[in-house]
Image: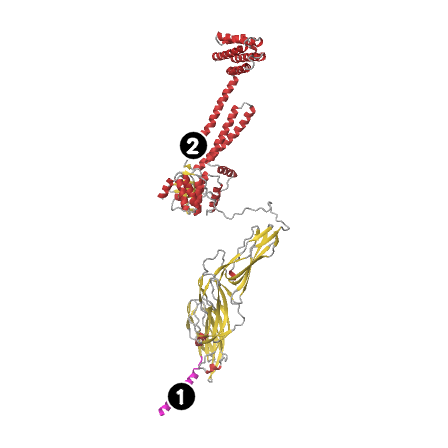
Amino acid sequence: MIGRAIWRSLALAGMLTCALARSDSQSITFQASVDKNPVGLGDQIVLTFTLSNAGTGVKNLHMPDLSAFRIMAGPNQASSFQMINGAVSSSVTFTCVLQPKEVGKFTIGEASVEAGGKEYRSSSFTVEVVKGSTPARKESAGQENLDAQIGDNLFLKASVDKAHCIQGEQVNVTFKLYTRVSVLNYAVSKNPALSGFWSEDVEMPKNIALSTETLNGKQYRVGIIRRIALFATQSGSLEIGPMEAQTTIQVQQQRTADPFDAFFRDPFGRNVNCAVRSEPIKLKVDPLPEGAPGEFKGAVGQFAMSAGVDKRTARTNDPVSLKITISGTGNIKLLESPAVQVPPDFEQYTPKVTETINRGGDRITGSKTFELLFIPRYPGLKVIEPITFYYFDLGRREYVKLRSPQLELNVEQGAAPLAPAMGGGAREDVRILSQDIRFIKVAQPSFARVGERFHRSWWFILLLAIPVLGFAGAFVYARQRQADMLDEAGYRQRRAIRVARNGLKQAEYLLKEKSGAKGEPSSLQRTRFYAEVSRALWKYLGDKLGLPQSEFSVEHAVEALKDQHVESGLVHGLKVLLEHCDLARFAPTSHQMSAMQKTYDEARRLIVELERTLK
Amino acid sequence: MLLSAAAVRAQTPEQLFQQGNLMYQQGRLPEAREAYEGLLAAGYVAGDIYYNLGNTYYRTGDIGHAILNYERALRYIPGDEDLRHNLQLANLLITDRIEAAPRLFFWDYWEGLKNAFSVNGASWLFVLTFFLVFASLVVVVLARRYRSKRLALAVTALGIVACALSLVLLVAKVSDFTRTDEGIVTTPISTVKNSPDEKASDAFVLHTGVKVRVVDRVSEWLEIRLADGKVGWVEKKTVEMI
C-alpha cells in the first residue's frame, strides 16, 4: 500500500516536473529550415527562419549569404500566437522563396536576429541542388490521411459500349466520375489522346445528373462528365488514352489528439484539390470486309443521297449548281464527294462542302452537302450521268450503292454568246484520253539481209548506166545526122534508090490498075505511066549523079554516067529507055500493055544495075 | 535457248515475224522479244522488226532498249508516223531532261528532208533525177526546133540541180545510216566519270534511254557527249550503239 502510494506520488511529481520542464522549454530559439532538401534545379524552395517564444520586439534580421540562389520572394515576416493549456507560445517566421542557380551543395550560413535586446543565431546547414525536379515530397501526415480517405472513394472510369468494332463504326466512350465524397467541382485537365480516330464530343447537359451505382459492394454516386463518339480511321489495336480531371472535394479532417486542433476544425470539412485519371482502354478494330467497290471511299453507317440541279433550264454562261446531299448516321465528317460525270463543255468549279452534325443523340447523325458549280458554255440538252455513292451498311454488313436519277439540263443560248478569240465557233480540240504507244506493225515487211542496200547493188549501177548509155547513143546519132545534113549531095545519092523505087511504085499502080478493066489503058493513063517512069529515072539520075534540075537532058546524063565508068551497054539501054518514054508519052504505039510492062521491067532492071555500079 | 534457236532455223522469216506479232498480242512479251531478236540474229533486217521489238521493250518497261530499237528502226523507216509517235512517248519517260542547244532553222529543214527519205528512197530519188537530166539532155541533142531545144536545156539545168541535191542527200543518208558513234544508255542508272578510270571523280549521272554520241574509245571506256554538250566517260557496257 505504502509502496503504491509512494509510486503514485512519484508519478505525480514526475508529471509536475514535466509540466515545469515544458514551461521551461518556452525558451527563445531561432531555427532555419527549408521545405525540401535536396532540391531540383528547376524547383523553388522555401527557406524559413523561425524565432520561437521571443514575444515582441523582433528586429534586425540579418540574412545569410544567399548568392548561390535567386531570391524569388521575401523575406516575409509572419507572427503566430498559441495558447495551449494556459501556456502561451508565440513564434515569428521569416520566409524566403529561393530558386537554385546551379547544381551542387550550398551552405546556407547563420542568420541573426535581435529580440528583446539579445541576438540569436541560427545554425548553418547545406542544401543540395540536383538536376531536374524532385518529386513533391509527401506533404505531411495529413496528406497521407487524405489519400487514405479518398482512396476508392473517388475515381474516374472510362468505358466503351463495344470493345470490338469495324473500321468506321461508331464507338461511344463514356467518362464517369465515381464518388463517395462530396465533389464541389471538377474540370477536365487533360483530354484523352485519340490517335487513329475521328472523334466527336457528344453534347452533354449543363448539369450533371447523378445516379447511384454499386461497385464492389460500395455505393457510389456516379456522374457522366464526358461522352465521346469515336470512329476508327484505321484497323488494328487502338488505344483510347487516359483522361485527367481536377476535382475539388470536401474532406472530413482526421481527429487529432490535440483538442485545441479539434476546436478549430471546420465543421464542413476541408476543401482539397484532387486529380483523378482514367485507365486507358484498348479497342480492337477490324478492317472493312473485302470486296469494296472501286468507288467506295470509306463511308460507313447508313446513308441516303439526294441530288438535284437548281434549275431545269439554264442559259449559257449562267452558273448552275448541282447539290448532292448525303445524310444519315455514321462517319459524316469523313464522307467524300461522289464522282460527277459532267458534260465536257461545262466549266466546273471546286465544290463547296457544308456539313451539319447532330451530336445530341446516342448516334452521330447529320448530313453533308456538296454544292458543285458549273457554267454551261454551249446550248443544248445536257445530261449529267447518274451519281453513284457507295457506303458500307453496318446493319446489313455489306456495301450498298446509292444511285441518283439521271439529271437533265436544258441549256439555251444566253444573251452574250461566248466569242472565242480565234473564231471557229464551237470547235474544240480533240481530247486525248490517254497517251500510249501505237500498235505493232503486223503487215509483212520486206526483209533485207544485213548490209543489203539498194545503193550498193548492181541494179543501182545499171540504172545509172542506162541514161548515160542512152545519151551517148543519142549523141552519136545526132552527130551523124548533122553530118548528113551538111553533105547534101551524098544525102541525095543515098536517098536516090528509095526515091526511084517510090516513083516506079506509082508507075506500077498505074500499070496494074488498067490491066484488069478493058485490057487496054486509056491514053491519059498511058501518058501518066510514062511520065512517072521518066520522072523516076530522071530523079534517080539527078540524085545519084548530083545533077542540078537545069541540066536534066539525055546528053548530060550520058556524059556523067561515062565519067562514072558505067559500062556502055548500060548507058545505051538507059538512053534508049529515056527516049522511048519521051516518045511513048506523046506518040501512042501498038501493044500498049505489053510495051508498058516491058518499059517498067526495063526501068527497074536499069536502076538496079546502076545502083550496083554507082555504089 | 537451244530450242528457240532451232525454232528460228526451222521457220521462214515471215513465220517468225508473225509468231512474234502473235505473242505480242497475247501479252507474252518475252516470247515476242525472242522471236524478233531471233529474226535479227538470223540476219534479217527491216524497220518493222525494230519497231515491234521497241514496242515489246516498252511494254516490259525497259525504256532504254525501247528507245534503242526505235532509233534503229528510224534508220530504216524514218518517215513512219507511228514510230515517231512511240519514240516521242518513250523519250518523255526518260528521267534526265537534256535540252539540245538550239540550232539554225536551216538545220531543222535539212533534218526534215532527211527524215522524209529512207536510204533506199534517197537512192531512188537520185536515180530518178539522174534519168531526168539525161532524158532532157537527149532531147536537147535530138530536138530539131530551137524552141524545144531551149525548153529541154532549162529542164536539164533544173535536173542537174535536183540531181546534185539528191546526191548530197543520198551521201548524207548513207553516212547517217552507217554511222557508229550514236548510242543509247541502257543501264538504269550510270555514273559518268571525268576520265576513263574507276577512281575518277563523278561528272554527272545518266539514266536509261538517253541518246549519246561516242567521241572516243579507250579500252573499256567510252567518251560520250550529250546533246547539250556535256562530256564524260562511261563504261562500255552502259551504252548500246544504235
Q: Nearer the viewer, mark 1 or mark 2?
A: 2
Q: Mainly helix, strand or loop, the magenta region?
A: helix
Q: Position of residue A65 (x, y in %)?
A: 45, 71
In the image, residue B49 above or below residue A586 = below
* Amino acid at dot 2: Ser
Disc 2 is placed on an element classified as loop
In primary-sequence order, the first of circles 1 and 2 is 1
Q: Secondary structure at mark 1?
A: helix
Q: Quadrant of residue A26?
A: bottom left
- The residue located at (60%, 57%) in the rendering is A310
Q: In the current view of this chain or complex, which residue is farthest to the bottom? A: A2
**Residue nearer the viewer, A588 or A92:** A588
Q: Depth check: A225 or B9 in front?
A: B9
Check if residue A6 falls in the magenta segment: yes
Indicate the chain on which mark 1 is placed: A
- Which residues fall within the magenta stretch? A1-28
Between A75 and A501, the one lying in front of the other is: A501
- Residue indicated by mark 2: A457
Circle 1 Cα neighbour tier, 10 Å, few/some/many (<14 / 14–19 / ≥20): few
Most extreme residue toward the front is A518
Residue behind mark 1 = A12
Q: Give the image location of residue A222, x and y in percent.
A: 49, 73
Q: Amino acid at mark 1?
A: Leu
Expressed as whole percent of the image width and height from the top left, the position of residue B67 reads 44, 43
